[in-house]
């Protein structure tokens, strides 16, 4: 049996969790900074680091208290050391390092994207229940679509720690596009949930927005779509009387736009993003003949995306929404599967803000006619 303490501070969530055997969540504490950053319309890095400093110790204490776990019962500390905001990563890593040294525990550095993948291995006590139902683990080989505020990757996973990057965004990440379009529409931060809510009242066919297929690659591009939304909003706001807008800049373009227009743009935009994500993931799953298709990352909590992948008729799996967005349970789960390679006296571990886990060109197996699948 293993008990791993996970620590996550790569962006604007201070999180700690205890996970048993890489699957069962014993505790999962997240101190969100969303309210703090809302007035800036996005994450303000310096404010984020300072808040992590204030929250990290109470969050770790709370995670151990809820898990009813003593330091002597832990087998390792796993901490996100990249990619992410350097100041934020440093707070989590230094806390983890100090605790690992003081308590004599192995310290394991975890890539944030690998952690998102391992959210698919997690089960909560409410799922397992008193009957201890065994939830089958994901089966390899699998495709994971990792879509967050910073990444949009399609990864072929042959086994634990065996990855091949098939495609990624060449400009904006999917979550970043959601956040930027939400800001244009005056829907606030974070943009993903706000667009999803507005889209429920809108018509996804109202506007024919562009899809960047970038055939035959598995890469994504969302900047053209974002610019198309900007043009729509600019055209529409040209009809809004100037008196309804106090300042004529892009941050105030949405003022005076009708709720109906905003809902239609949100629905059309969401539909365009989801269509490309689902089709590329489907094509990769077919080309590599995988056993399962997994979703991960904050955008994986999007209801339309989940609905559309389920309709593909292939085995699909995604974490509950609270485990799609940043948390430390996924870090602890990834740590469990790296326990065997944990280094003793790993005190040289450093933050790697631009750390890439997935390397192109290392695919053991090539697809047959990938572009026509
Ligand atoms: O994985 P995550 O919590 O943090 C990063 O690693 O970036 O992802 C955050 C991103 C944000 O861009 C947010 O707008 C997006 O996930 N997101 C969503 C939804 N919930 C969060 N995007 C679309 N639909 C959602 N329901
Ligand atoms: Zn994340």
Image (tube, rainbow, N blue to C red):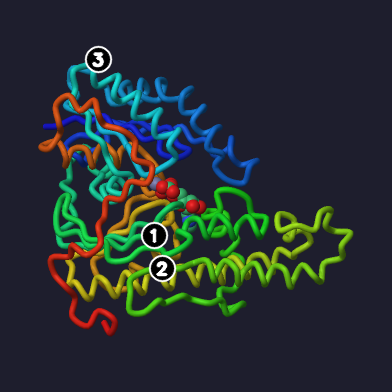
* Distance CA(mark 2)–CA(mark 1): 7 Å
x then y, percent, for residue 352 = 34, 40
Q: Residues within 10 Å of mark 2 (few under 14, many from 20)?
A: many
- Residue designated by label 1: 152
Which secondary structure, mark 1?
strand
Which residue is labeled 3 in the image?
A: 102
Task: Judge whether residue 142 can be spotted in this image.
Answer: yes
Q: Tell me residue 174's x, y (percent).
A: 46, 60
- Determine whether 212 is above or below 25 in the image: below
Q: In the image, what residue occupies the spot 48% across and 22% down?
A: 54
Front position in the image: 349 or 236: 349
Estimate the x, y position of residue 322 in percent, counting from the top left.
Answer: 40, 45
Q: Quadrant of the N terminus?
A: top left
Q: Quadrant of residue 342?
A: top left
Residue 220, labelled with which disc? 2
Q: Quadrant of residue 316?
A: bottom left
At x 60%, y 68%, the residue is 227
Q: Earlier in the sequence, mark 2 or mark 1?
A: 1
Specify whether 277 is left or right of 158. right
Work out whether mark 1 precedes mark 3 in sequence or the reverse, and give the earlier one: 3
Secondary element at tag 3: helix
Kindly report the distance in space between the C-alpha atoms of the residues bearing marks 3 and 2: 45 Å
The span from disc 1 to disc 3 (Cα, nearest Å) is 38 Å
Instruction: Look at the image and tell me whether residue 125 can be seen.
Output: no
Outermost residue on the right side: it is 243
Do residues under tags 2 and 1 come within 8 Å of each other at their CB atoms? Answer: yes
């Amino acid at each position: 049996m293993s008990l791993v303490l996970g620590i996550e501070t790569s962006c604007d969530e201070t999180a700690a969790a205890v996970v048993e055997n890489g699957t069962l969540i014993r505790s999962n504490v997240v101190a969100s900074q969303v309210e703090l950053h809302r007035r800036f319309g996005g994450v303000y890095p310096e404010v984020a680091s300072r808040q992590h400093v204030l929250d990290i110790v109470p969050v770790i204490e709370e995670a151990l208290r809820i898990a009813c776990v003593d330091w002597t019962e832990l087998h390792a500390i796993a901490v996100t050391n990249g990619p992410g905001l350097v100041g934020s990563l440093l707070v989590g890593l230094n806390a983890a390092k100090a605790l690992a040294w003081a308590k004599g525990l192995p310290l394991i550095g975890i890539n944030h994207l690998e952690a998102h993948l391992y959210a698919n291995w997690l089960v909560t006590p409410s799922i397992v229940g008193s009957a201890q139902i065994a939830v089958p683990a994901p089966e390899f080989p699998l495709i994971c679509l990792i879509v967050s505020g910073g990444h949009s990757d399609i990864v072929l996973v042959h086994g634990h720690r065996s990855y091949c990057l098939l495609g990624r965004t060449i400009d904006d990440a999917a979550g970043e596009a959601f956040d930027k379009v939400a800001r244009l529409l005056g829907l606030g931060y974070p943009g993903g949930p706000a667009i999803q809510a507005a889209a429920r009242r809108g018509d996804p066919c109202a506007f024919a927005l562009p899809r960047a297929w970038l055939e035959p690659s598995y890469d994504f591009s969302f900047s053209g779509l974002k610019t198309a939304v900007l043009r729509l909003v600019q055209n529409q706001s040209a009809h809004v009387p100037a008196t309804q807008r106090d300042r004529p800049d892009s941050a105030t373009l949405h003022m005076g736009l009708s709720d109906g227009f905003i809902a239609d743009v949100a629905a059309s935009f969401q539909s365009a993003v989801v269509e490309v994500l689902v089709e590329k993931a489907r094509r990769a799953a077919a080309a590599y003949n995988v056993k399962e298709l997994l979703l991960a990352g904050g955008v994986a909590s999007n209801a339309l995306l989940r609905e559309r992948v389920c309709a593909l008729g292939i085995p699909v799996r995604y974490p509950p929404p609270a485990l799609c967005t940043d948390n430390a349970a996924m870090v602890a789960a990834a740590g469990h599967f790296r326990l065997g390679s944990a280094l003793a006296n790993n005190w040289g571990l450093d933050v790697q803000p631009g750390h890439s886990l997935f390397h192109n060109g290392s695919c053991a197996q090539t697809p047959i006619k990938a572009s026509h699948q």
